[in-house]
Image (spheres, rainbow, N blue to C red):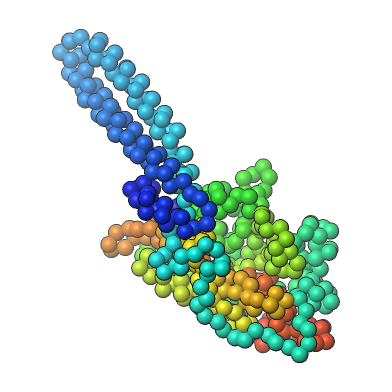
Amino acid sequence: MLDVKYIAENAEEIKEIMSHRSGTYDVDKVRDLYFKRKELLVETEQRKAMRNRVSDEIAVIKRNKGDTTQLIAEMKALGEEIKKFDDELAQIDPVLKEAVLSIPNIPHSSVPVGKDESDNVEVRRWGEPRKASFELKPHWDIGANLGILDQPTAAKITGTRFTIYRGLGARLERAIINFMLDCHTANGYTEILPPFMVNRDSMYGTGQLPKFEEDAFSVKNNGYFLIPTAEVPVTNMHRGDVLDEKSLPIKYCAYTACFRAEAGSAGRDTRGLIRQHQFNKVELVKFVRPSESMAELEALTHDAESILQKLGLAYRVVCLCTGDTGFSSGKTYDIEVWMPSYNRYVEISSCSNFFDYQARRMNIKFKGESGSAFVHTLNGSGLAVGRTTAAILETYQNEDGSVTIPEALKPYMGAEIIR
């Protein structure tokens, strides 16, 4: 979250910034509640100071056998006033907190101003999109023909937007996960296997709540949520911690299944592996010094890109504009892999710098010789596994319907081709 004092004292500037983000945000509510709370605190503290002073006077008068009846009556009335102010503060505090949590992060000055994804700016490309002398099939047809992707059976046992992987399809998914984890741990990331469910505080900490609760799967009767990304449990590992500055940067990678309701996405990418309610992902998470966070974002993005390069998959990197940048992010690069079936690039990773936005929500600080401050947090997919599987099936398909395994995955697969 943003600093509430900063929002209140710079309300007009914040409103101008928010006008370039998607959605509408009530900055005036935060400002009005902040100054109302400040006014109430002043009134309350003045009365409490008066009560303390008069209480001392009453004690002196009593020692001197004087009459304190009038003062005691006045203090009783003053106590009722204090209680009234305390009650008002108790009512304002949760409303103000919710109002602050509803304001998104401030985009970095290097983020292009724009309305939506059409205003995103391409940064670079790598590799050449697959071209073939035969008609390239979509991955859902390839998977069905090879008997390695089975959505009808998944729909029978669960519902739409789920997939069963069979045989070499299941092995391919597992091979990709292991390959990604091996690559990232070799680059200095510590592997984490976190819970796939988290509590409400964790969802608030990374910014999924309160705004995106409709996109989450909640677990009935116990207050848990199925995680939408490993970002949630892994970043919350240090909730409330004061980290040693010498330990920074801290770099984690984690495989998890991810669960998303995909509210509002009806009719979009419903076939195949692109938009599932459950999917696998390897996530990268960093805790860094504020002075190093922009450089660490570039490094994290390159770490995610390296997976696609090793797999020989063409991709591009785009910088998201203000209107397309995620709620908690200050700057985001999307990595988009080439998908022949779409004849376009499709997002396979988002790499984001949140600055101190998440750290303020979770109260994660670091301490060094110069004092303490909030850390900066970053994360990015390294990569979305199902989309990587889809890109491999489409890019490495052969005219006879088989799929050649990329060289980097052959040691993990124990096979060179899927027939």
Q: Residue furthest bottom?
A: 133
Q: Is residue 63 left or right of residue 192?
A: left
Q: Quadrant of the C terminus?
A: bottom right
Q: How many marks?
A: 0
Q: Is residue 261 or residue 296 the one in the foreground?
A: 261
Vertical arrangement, residue 49 with respect to residue 388, above or below: above
Q: Residue 401, relative to residue 301: is it above or below?
A: below
The answer to whether residue 345 is left or right of residue 96 is: right
Residue 415 % position (x, y): 75, 85
Q: Position of residue 413 (x, y in %)?
A: 72, 81
Instruction: Decide if residue 24 is on the left or right side of residue 308.
Output: left
Which residue shows up at 70% across the image and 87% down it? 131
Q: Quadrant of residue 317?
A: bottom right
Residue in view at x 68 percent, y 45 percent: 220
Q: Is residue 24 above or below residue 156?
A: above
Between residue 115 and residue 327, name the one nearer to us.
Answer: 115
**Which residue lies at the image location 28% right of the left edge and 63% below the top edge?**
369
Locate residue 135, reporting x and y percent.
Answer: 78, 84
Vertical placement of 322 versus 300: above or below?
above
Residue at the extreme left: 64
Q: Is residue 247 visible?
A: no
Give coordinates of residue 172: x percent, y percent.
72, 77
Res. 334 visible in picture: yes
Residue at figure coordinates x 48%, y 44% from the top left:
98
Q: In the image, 144: left or right of 281?
A: right
